[in-house]
Image (cartoon, rainbow, N blue to C red):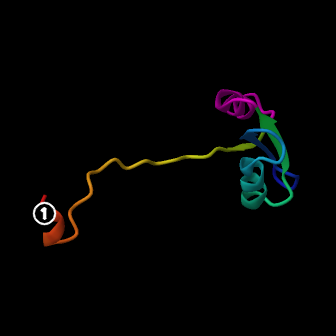
Amino acid sequence: MHGSTPRVAYQGVPGAYSEAAAGKAYFNCEAIPCDQFEVAFQAVELWIADRAVLPVEIYLKQPRAPKGPSELQA
């Protein structure tokens, strides 16, 4: 990859948000669409791609604390 255009695998179809994220992370990269996350990982493992850009979502499921005395009265 040194001195050449990076090949970046992403999960999704051309035009997907992940493709835009790959282009933002690696300017002028060759974006490689993959239909599944595992395929994107395999593309890197098999040297088809130099990198992979994959979305990560974090969901916090915590109970919301009452805002004040009025919410404590039920």
Task: Residue lying at the far front in this picture: please name it.
Answer: 74
Q: Residue 62 vs residue 57: left or right?
A: left
> In the image, what residue type sits under mark 1?
Leu
> Is residue 64 toward the left or the right of residue 19 in the image?
left
Name the residue beneath numbered marker 1.
72
Q: What is the x, y in percent for residue 54?
A: 64, 44
Task: Give yes or no for residue 45 being in the magenta stretch.
Answer: yes
Q: Nearer the viewer, residue 8 or 73?
A: 73
Which residue does the image show at 65% across and 27% down from the upper left? 38
Q: Is residue 39 above or below residue 56?
A: above
Start-end of magenta stretch: 35-48
The prevailing secondary structure element of the residues shown in magenta is helix
Residue at 76% across, 33% down: 34
Estimate the x, y position of residue 45 in percent, counting from the top left: 70, 30
Q: How many marks?
A: 1
**Badge 1: residue crowd in 10 Å (few <14, some 14–19, many ≥20):** few
The picture places residue 1, in percent across and down from the top left corner, at 81, 48
Position of the C terminus by quadrant: bottom left
49 sits to left or right of 53: right
Magenta residue check for 18: no
Disc 1 secondary structure class: helix
Place residue 3 in its image quadrant. Answer: bottom right
At 84% from the left edge and 53% from the top edge, which residue is drawn? 29
Q: Quadrant of residue 48?
A: top right
Taking the spot 29% from the left edge, 50% from the top edge, the residue there is: 62
The image shows residue 55 at horizontal and vertical percentages of 61, 46
